[in-house]
Image (spheres, rainbow, N blue to C red):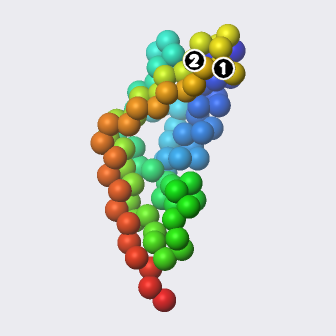
Amino acid sequence: MESIIARALEYTLKYWLKSFSRDQFKLQGRTAQLSNLDINGDALHASLVLPPSLAVETARVGKLQITLPSVSNVQVEPIVVNIDKLDLCFIAITS
């Protein structure tokens, strides 16, 4: 069951991060830690519902820690995401 959770986490991280491979994280117990990550600007733009006139130029996370619920409680306990240092740079798009 833990491998299913690890694959789901990998799938989600691939959406949010510019370049990601499973080698970048190891699930230690129920916690995964990653550092120096480039965030996919398009995914961030869509999730923040930014106006089309504003673009994400760069987005970077210094350290990311993800704590997963136990397998028996995966549907009732939250997934906890801690972000240490988030750098965002937006640019205005003019016509």
Which residue position is annotated with label 1? 76
Percent from the top left, x then y, of residue 66? 47, 27
In front: mark 1 or mark 2?
Answer: 1
Q: Is residue 30 positioned above or below 52 on the image?
A: above
The numbered mark at residue 69 is 2
Percent from the top left, x then y, of residue 37? 39, 44
Asked if marks 1 and 2 touch (Cβ < 8 Å), the reply is: yes
Q: Nearer the viewer, residue 9 or 92?
A: 92
Residue lying farthest to the bottom in this orientation: 95
Residue found 46% across the figure and 72% down from its top: 54
Residue 25 seen in the current view: no
Left or right: 17, with 70 as reference point: left
Image quadrant for the N terminus? Answer: top right
Residue found 38% across the figure and 72% down from its top: 91
Percent from the top left, x then y, of residue 60? 36, 49
Q: Quadrant of residue 78?
A: top right
Residue found 54% across the figure and 74% down from its top: 52
Q: Quadrant of residue 5?
A: top right
**Rounded to the nearest whole Å, what is the CA distance between mark 1 and mark 2?**
8 Å
Q: Is residue 55 positioned above or below 10 on the image?
A: below
Q: For mark 2, does the 10 Å Cα neighbourhood hold few (<14), some (14 to 19), or many (20 or more) residues?
A: some
Secondary structure under tag 2 reads loop
Q: For mark 1, does the 10 Å Cα neighbourhood hold few (<14), some (14 to 19), or many (20 or more) residues?
A: few
The numbered mark at residue 50 is none
Upstream in the sequence, badge 1 or badge 2?
2
Amino acid on which disc 1 is placed:
Val
Secondary structure under tag 1 reads loop
Amino acid on which disc 2 is placed:
Pro
Residue found 41% across the figure and 49% down from its top: 38
Left or right: 4, with 37 as reference point: right
Percent from the top left, x then y, of residue 53? 49, 77
